[in-house]
């Protein structure tokens, strides 16, 4: 390969898959601000502001609302590894790929995991979860809210209360659903929740917002063992087992996010600027206004896809507001259509995983990209590409159908 390479100059893309999406330009601008040291008072003030802003995003008063320098998967793993001790019982109601990820992470941590399986494209009625909690008596109920692999959004209003009534704590993966679908952490009594920036929050991937209530924070504090080189004089470790990961050890990370500012990893200051700007923008729009914008975008996308005669995947009453699964017409090659969308129109739509691979595409309308011009462009491009690939479509105009939704 000849060196030196050219500067980075990515082709223009409209990212309309299940995430990542194009970040809000204001987030890119915030991320180009000058670096600060991670103990600089100017920087720690930004950390405090980010905590306050993310309390709004999670609809919580939880003191322990902060960010971890990882992608969303790292945030999931951080909570699970900080909570789960070997042999703990974990119940995972799973309705897609990301439920199975919770099983995978929990079992790697030595938990006794029971998975409740639901057909992909459906969600759990709360009674089903309650029955399993009663029978299995887990320490933790770990569940995904919006599972992007199936586009389904699990109702959680009852789940936190059910777990609490039976002495369990909840962990929720809200990476893909938060800020596009309601997630009322305090009202629904959810104990620990994690997210990511790259979906409805409107930023790049690389920072994991987390919120923990006092109960979970105390459980994690009981496992606080400060690494040898930075132990403060007279430090007494927690009474329970040491968290098995160093990097994802929330007890140590919380010590840095506390007034104590005890060192752990070097904070990714640029990611914090970006995450803070995302939450600031959400706050300015109003969280509920943003969710309504996602619902409107979803209605427009659905109307456009149905106008072409395409069949939608799953239980539409529980579809996430920010992504739609659509069956690939039998007469076209799904990957070739996606390639033409990308190469001719610069628009990315999503493939799918596991049992749905080759059967559905997943089309997003999320974050910065959940707005009328981008939804109309995506529908118009998809219609042109599908016709060129010989799809037998209905005569109705998908762009017109989506414009009707916006006009209403
Ligand atoms: C519901 C859900 N959980 C977790 C993840 C993993 O996130 P990341 O790829 O940022 O680690 C994703 C990513 O698509 C997701 O949709």
Image: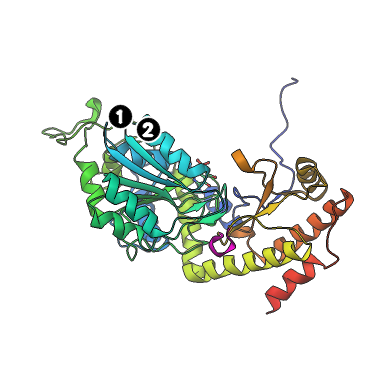
- Mark number, residue 107: 2
Q: Is residue 160 a member of the stretch shown in magenta?
A: no
Residue furthest bottom as drawn = 408
Mark 1 burial class by Cα count in 10 Å: few <14, some 14-19, many 20+: few
Mark 2 burial class by Cα count in 10 Å: few <14, some 14-19, many 20+: some
Residue 100 placement, left or right of 330: left
Mark 1 or 2: the one toward you: 2
Residue 116 placement, left or right of 6: left
Magenta range is: 315-319
124 above or below 290? above
Do we see residue 215 in this rendering? yes
SS at mark 2 in the image: helix
Return the residue nearer the eye: 193 or 152.
152
> Residue 337: horizontal and vertical position, in percent?
79, 46
The N terminus - image quarter: top right
- Mark number, residue 322: none
């Amino acid at each position: 390969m000849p060196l030196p390479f050219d500067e980075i100059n990515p082709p223009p893309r409209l990212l309309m898959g299940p995430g990542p999406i194009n970040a809000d330009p204001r987030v890119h601008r915030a991320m180009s601000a000058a670096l600060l040291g991670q103990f600089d008072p100017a920087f720690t003030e930004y950390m405090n502001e980010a905590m306050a802003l993310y309390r709004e995003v999670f609809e919580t008063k939880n003191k322990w609302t902060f960010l971890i320098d990882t992608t969303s998967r790292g945030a999931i793993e951080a909570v699970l590894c900080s909570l789960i001790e070997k042999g703990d019982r974990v119940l995972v109601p799973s309705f897609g790929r990301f439920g199975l990820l919770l099983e995978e992470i929990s079992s790697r941590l030595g938990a006794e995991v029971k998975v409740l399986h639901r057909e992909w494209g459906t969600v759990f009625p709360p009674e089903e979860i309650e029955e399993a909690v009663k029978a299995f008596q887990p320490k933790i109920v770990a569940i995904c809210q919006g599972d992007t692999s199936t586009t389904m959004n699990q109702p959680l209003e009852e789940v936190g209360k059910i777990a609490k009534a039976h002495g369990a704590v909840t962990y929720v993966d809200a990476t893909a659903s938060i800020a596009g679908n309601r997630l009322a952490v305090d009202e629904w009594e959810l104990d620990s929740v994690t997210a990511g920036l790259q979906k409805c929050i409107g930023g790049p991937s690389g920072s994991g917002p987390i919120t923990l209530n006092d109960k979970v924070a105390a459980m994690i504090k009981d496992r606080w063992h400060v690494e040898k080189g930075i132990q403060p004089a007279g430090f007494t470790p927690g009474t329970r087992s040491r968290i098995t990961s160093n990097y994802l050890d929330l007890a140590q990370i919380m010590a840095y996010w506390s007034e104590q500012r005890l060192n752990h990893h070097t904070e990714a200051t640029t990611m914090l600027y970006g995450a803070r700007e995302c939450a600031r923008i959400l706050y300015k729009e109003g969280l509920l206004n943003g969710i309504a914008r996602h619902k409107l975008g979803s209605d427009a996308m659905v109307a456009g896809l149905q106008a072409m005669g395409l069949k939608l995947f799953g239980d539409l009453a529980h579809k996430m507001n920010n992504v739609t699964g659509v069956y690939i017409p039998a007469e076209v090659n799904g990957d070739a259509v996606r390639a033409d969308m990308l190469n001719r129109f610069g628009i990315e739509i999503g493939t799918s995983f596991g049992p749905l691979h080759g059967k559905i595409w997943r089309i997003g309308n999320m974050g910065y990209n959940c707005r009328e011009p981008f939804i109309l462009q995506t529908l118009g491009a998809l219609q042109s590409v599908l016709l060129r690939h010989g799809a037998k479509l209905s005569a109705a105009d998908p762009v017109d159908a989506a414009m009707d939704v916006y006009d209403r």
